Amino acid sequence: MTAQRALVRRTALSVTAGAAALVLAACGSDSGSGGHDMGSMESDSSPTATASAKAGDHNDADVDFSKEMIQHHRQAVDMAELAADRASSQEVKDLATKVKGAQDPEIKTMSGWLTSWGEDVPEEMSGAMDHDMSSAMPGMMSGKDMDKLEKASGAEFDTMFLTMMVEHHEGAVEMAETEKADGKNGPATKLADAVVTAQTAEIKQMNKMLGKS
């Protein structure tokens, strides 16, 4: 664990101060230990150390997880923002606020990881075609699905939103389980574990709201 932590600290050199702070927040229980202190990170600033850290502290599964989950989260945030305007139930609105509040910071955190690994951050999706291009990921809604949700209102919207978000969360849990099994990067696998825990609980909550449990 000590060696892995040191590698993460060295990798974080290439991230901006703002992105690094987001990584600290995402790592939760580690933030109080000072294990990711910026002053300590700067002491390992040699190009050789940074290159070595980039090569050794993550693998392809970590990269795929981060890139795909960024797009997955972006769609969930889009759905949550629709719910904030269209939902008739305050319970649905509160859930949407919770989803957006959790996933926006995770998008920023994963974007920081990709930058530190020398990888491209996925571009923002815009329009039905882009949703369709990403719909191969588990739980992703198609462009047609999103159009239907945008046109719905009232109780119909609430039911459609909850039904779609259950499927969306189930896909995220599947992706996170793959990262937990195949990933190498400590913060990434830790985030994946947090996704499984939080979104499994929200799936149960939404099914209850739909009268399925």
Image (spheres, rainbow, N blue to C red):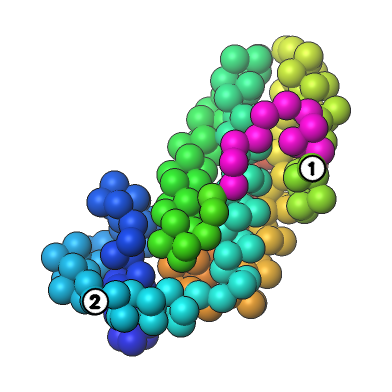
| Residue type, label 1 | Met
Assign the N terminus to one quadrant of the image: bottom left
The x and y percentages for residue 168 are 72, 45
Residue that label 1 marks: 133
Query: Residue at 48% of width from left, 40% of height from top?
Result: 104
Which stretch is magenta? 122-132
71 is within the stretch colored magenta: no
Q: Residue 91's quadrant in the figure?
A: top right
The x and y percentages for residue 97 are 51, 30
Query: Residue at 30% of width from left, 80% of height from top?
Result: 49
The x and y percentages for residue 148 are 82, 21
Q: Secondary structure at mark 1?
A: helix
| 168 to 80, vertically: above or below | below
Assign the C terminus to one quadrant of the image: top right
Say whether residue 41 is left or right of residue 69: left
Please count the marks in the image: 2
**Foreground residue, 57 or 99?**
57
Of labels 1 and 2, the one closer to you: 2
Q: Residue 209's quadrant in the figure?
A: top right
Residue that label 2 marks: 46
**Foreground residue, 75 or 50?**
50
The x and y percentages for residue 186 are 45, 74
> Which one is earlier in the sequence, the residue at label 1 or at label 2?
2
**Foreground residue, 90 or 74?**
74
Query: Residue at 59% of width from left, 47% of height from top?
Result: 122
Say whether residue 140 is left or right of residue 53: right
Q: Determine crowd level at label 2: few under 14, some 14-19, many 20+ residues with C-alpha closer than 10 A.
A: few
